[in-house]
Amino acid sequence: MLAELTVRNLAVIEETRLAFGPGLNVITGETGAGKSLLVDALVFVLGGGADRGMMRHGADSTSVEAVFSVRERHAHEALSELGVEVDEEDGTTVLYREVHKEGRTVSRLNGRAVPASVLRAVGGALVDIHGQGSHLSLLDPHFQMRVLDDFGGLGDRRSAVESAVAQTQRLRGELTDADAATREAEQRRDLLAFQVDEIEAAEPVDGEEEALLRERNMLEHAESVRDACTAAYHALSEGDRNAIDLAAEALNHLRRSPGAAEALAVQIEALESAVAQFTDAAREVRNLAESVESDPARLAEIEERVALLRRLKRKYGDSESAVLAFAEDARAQLERMENADERREQLERALTEASREAGAVAVELSEARQRAATALQDAVAAELREVGLERASFDVAVEREEADDGLPAPDGGRYVFRRSGIDRVTFRARTNPGEESRPLARVASGGETSRMMLALNGALQTASGAPSLVFDEIDAGIGSRAGDVVGRKLWTVGRRAQVLCVTHLPQIAVWADTHFRVGKAVQDGRTYSGAESLSDEARAEEIAGMLGSGASVAQVAREMLERAAKGKRVPSPEGEGDAP
């Protein structure tokens, strides 16, 4: 509920602070004292228009702070969806807003600067202001559907529909992704197949180009390689003074030396190794000299193979192994494409079944909503008569819209669907005979609309709306008898939600659980306005003042308060319990 409202420098209000209580809070005062300014202040702090003309003369800024104590589960959920953290202990949520003389505005939520749009969203979850059309959740078609479902006790059915529709939407999304993937795959399939075939036909081997380049170098210089090998072989093993014979001769000299085994062991071992290496090298260069031949055909073959490998590397990777890895990945993609067709068929079957199930439960919910709509219309009609709106009418339109891609219904039709089902719920009203029934959002604001909203709130037995309801102008055009009925209705609604009401009718004011009086005074040529909470004695004086002048008004005021107090102890016709 709204726990506290602090207003500074708003028109004739220099500063005032109101501590509201649960139940019905009534604000009274003489005409022009500033009663409706408090409603204007609330609209402002909830993100409404910021007009510098509202600023008190001589002030640099106007500010309003609203402190809420949020304890209702549905209000907690609504704020949580908006990303608002609520104090766990007392549920305190603080909204603050100010406008400066130069036009700059500041908005804060729990001490943190936020855009005014955030205050509007949070305000919409906490307060409904009836009479000006501001922050009125009942004007929102989505909220109207929620109200109807709560009234009809359709929460479980709605949850079942939301779950079924969520499954359908998930499968639709997966099928859409699969279709997109299939289209992309068709565009890539031929390319991937060509790439795999090209690589498989080439059969590259890791390190192949490097080996080919070595062979090519050999073939390109075959004659010089052969000559060099022949000369090397001759130097190593041919002729009178070849390397092998000289190394062997040196080795024999060392071996014949006395004590050679100890003193010359290292040198002897080195020469033995050299003789063996010279012998191996001579054999290898001789074999190479005999094998190296000019082969133009093989050289052309190598050139062609190297060109092919380099072309593959330019297209698919920097090395033969990278090219082979590319081919492996392409084959895997082709395999997934083949499986995608089967997966798509599975999704289509699953979607058909899920849509059928969702359509069935959505139609059941729709039919239940139709029945709940009739019951709500009847309940509101009875309430309208009690608040003096016998000529007004209220109806609930539960409509469907056909669409080729909608949910299939058992009757063979297909309907547009949302998570809430296949219905579009609209609260409609007509305030006078002969007028067209119109959506609540298009019904002109004023006293009649406020009473219609009161009748609707009276008919609703659940506290699913905003925790705080504000009624301004609700007493416009009604007399004392209707005022008493409206007062009791306001008090009754206050058993489920906090109610704030600005009124000039004493018949309404006597039903207050908390009563505020707004007064104004002139001091040093300036007008000051403020509000105070009234004690029981002060309430009697205020009610008497509202009744008019005369010797008996004080007694009448006390009697009215006593009757209202007795009425609060008697269960209301709506079946509400006694006052707490």
Image (cartoon, grey):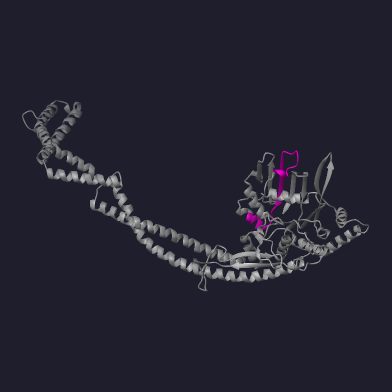
Q: Quadrant of residue 208?
A: top left
Residue 307's spot in the image, x, y percent?
A: 22, 44
- In front here: 570 or 42? 42
- In front here: 42 or 522? 522
Q: Could you tell whether 564 is left or right of 149 in the image?
A: right
- In front here: 550 or 197? 550
Q: Magenta stretch containing residue 262, yes or no?
A: no
Where is 454 relative to 261, above or below? below
Residue 503's spot in the image, x, y percent?
A: 79, 56
Q: Could you tell whether 47 is left or right of 417 in the image?
A: right
Residue 484's spot in the image, x, y percent?
A: 81, 63
Where is 523 relative to 558, above or below? above
How many marks can you see? 0
Residue 145 seen anywhere in this rendered image of the structure:
yes
Q: Magenta stretch containing residue 63, yes or no?
A: yes
Residue depicted at x 26% and y 54%: 197
- In front here: 37 or 266? 37
Residue 195's spot in the image, x, y percent?
A: 29, 52
Q: Could you tell whether 180 is left or right of 453 in the image?
A: left
Residue extending furthest bottom? 411
Residue 574 seen anywhere in this rendered image of the structure:
no
Where is 380 relative to 284, above or below? below
Residue extending furthest right? 551
Residue extending furthest left? 240
Q: Could you tell whether 68 is left or right of 518 in the image?
A: left
Quadrant of the snapshot with the N terminus: bottom right
Quadrant of the snapshot with the C terminus: bottom right
The stretch of residues the image draws in magenta is 52-78
Residue depicted at x 20% and y 41%: 213
Residue extending furthest front? 434
